[in-house]
Image (cartoon, helix red, strand yellow):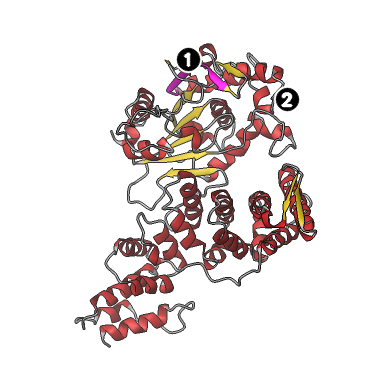
Amino acid sequence: MSVAAYCIFCCRQIGTSGPATKKQPSWNDIKHFSTFDGEDHECALWLLLKRTQSEDKEVRLQAVQELAKNTHWHDYQYGTVAQACDQRTAIGLARSKDIDLRFFLPPPSLPKMKNDYLIEDELRLLLVSLPQTGLDPCVQYFTSLALRESSQTLAAQRGGLWCFGGNGLPYCETLGKVPSETVELFCLQALVQHSKVSSHCDKIEAQGGLQLLQRIYQLRKDSAKIQRNIIRIIGNMALDERLHSSIVRAGWVSVLAEVMKSPHVIQSSHASRALANLDRDTVQEKYPDGVYVLHPQYRSSQPIRADILFVHGLMGAAFKTWRQQDIDQPVDKKAPEVQEYSQCWPKTWLASDCPALRIISVEYDTRLSDWKAKCPVEPHRTSIAYRSNELLEKLRVAGIGERPLVWVSHSMGGLLVKKMLVDASKNPEMDKIVNNTRGIIFYSVPHHGSQLAEYSINARYLLFPSVEVKELSKDSPALKVLNDDFLSVAKDKKFPVLSFAETLPTHIGSMLKLHVVPLESAKLGIGELIPVDVNHLNICKPKKKEAFLYQRTLKFIQDVLATDLGE
């Protein structure tokens, strides 16, 4: 058998339409090929594909790595790989840095729909098909909101006009200006909540939800918010390995591979999380909703020796809290030559300085006021105690505690870190998180409360201060108990602690200007406290990589992890 004939044989075996139906040649057969007939690249391609399906994990991982590095092939050869590779290989390629997108088949063609009205209708039908009783109150709230808004809009459409009410603004427009994207966003937010429930993910898949989401994704390329919600749903569904084949067949691997290349950290990190949940060959952990890996986002031969966990505060987020400080530039002056702006300095600067770290950022909803709250039910669910239990479970699934760990927190996030460590110290199943903690960084954390709570109660524009704000009341008994409990654990475990404190007031809305966390409240009682001439929002946003805030943070991390990193 010639090499060319063998390649054709392999093509038939690996094929494009499913598993092989004939016996494949053994490795002994391959050894008999001693001459090449001018099709060396073709043979190399098929041999690599063969190796990607090896039972030996190291062999197939190496083969995927070699495939990913090939940049000299013709379009049809990339197309061959796209058609012939198996699910595991496609996911591995998608998680390879600088991958050529020609390795992936485009999403399967879907029947064209006549108009946006049908998409809204299908989204409503999908939501109605999901369980409606015995639900988490937030799932119920978002589902009823989405069905109500879409029903009102559709009913108005049929009359030639639409009036958007409910949580929106009460106004009417002509039929030509129907806000389909707004209705879709309500429905997608409800689906995000449903996708957190494993049994609901099964229903979404069974009802053709993966294909419907693909259609909406392709139609709404101009809406980053819609696309981000959809990828968030895919990431949640990917937590269930039983759904992986369905996700791949619906064409999501090629979409996620493309979004991984996005210059926008929020988009790429959502895609990275979904692919990590799909990649069971190299990722042991799973990343629940709201837990994002900032580094490494691709497969890497670099061993991970420790974890850094970032926890934002009130009104913060997993990415925007940790961006580089915005620098105001006078209009009449030419902007100086500066380094590229960092949308998320842990992902760029810290990952570059400490490549052996796994850097994770978590996200949870917080708010100043219960007025127009996202989910105005069961307020206890937004308490620090509730969030601690919820986040600890997510972190356990993500493998936090298996490696040496450093916590980095801002504002109320520091109180949450303290509560999690106190709770973990009382739970034998979580004690690894405490025992592996190597250090904690607090950026303007109100250990003894914040003036914001008092101002919120008195300020009429806030109307109803949220549970989060009420818990920050100055010198509250609950904060004192939490601080005493934490100090007991910290002193017993000898946690190294570094605290930063703001010295400048912060503008809150157009009415308030105050020191959100005064110096005396930022004093924990242990560790070093460093006052910095910035306000509450910028205390965790260094102006540049060379700035004191970042360099001191970096030094602390390197010092407490010196033994673990071998430095």
Q: Quadrant of the N terminus?
A: bottom left
**In this rendering, is residue 215 above or below 549?**
below
Q: Nearer the viewer, residue 513 or 494?
A: 513
Specify few, some or many for label 1: CA neighbours under 10 Å numbering under 14, 14-19, or 20 or more. some
Examine the image and state in which quarter residue 315 appears.
Answer: top right
What secondary structure is the magenta-colored segment mainly?
strand
Measured as percent of width and height from the top left, residue 84 is found at: 41, 74
The residue lying at 33 percent from left, 75 percent from top is 46
Comparing 191 with 14, the one in front is: 191
Query: Residue 375 at x, y = what percent?
Result: 71, 39
Q: Provide the residue designation for mark 1.
A: 503
Front residue of 267/295: it is 267
Q: Which residue is mark 2?
A: 463
- The kind of residue tagged 1 is Thr
What SS does tag 1 mark? loop
- The CA span between labels 1 and 2 is 28 Å
- Which region of the structure is painted magenta? 495-507
Dot 1 or dot 2, earlier in sequence: 2
Residue 242, by quadrant, is bottom right
Amino acid found under the numbered disc labelled 2:
Leu
Q: Specify whether 240 is left or right of 25.
A: right
Image quadrant occupied by the C terminus: top left
Q: Measured along the vertical axis of the image, is residue 26 above or below residue 364?
A: below
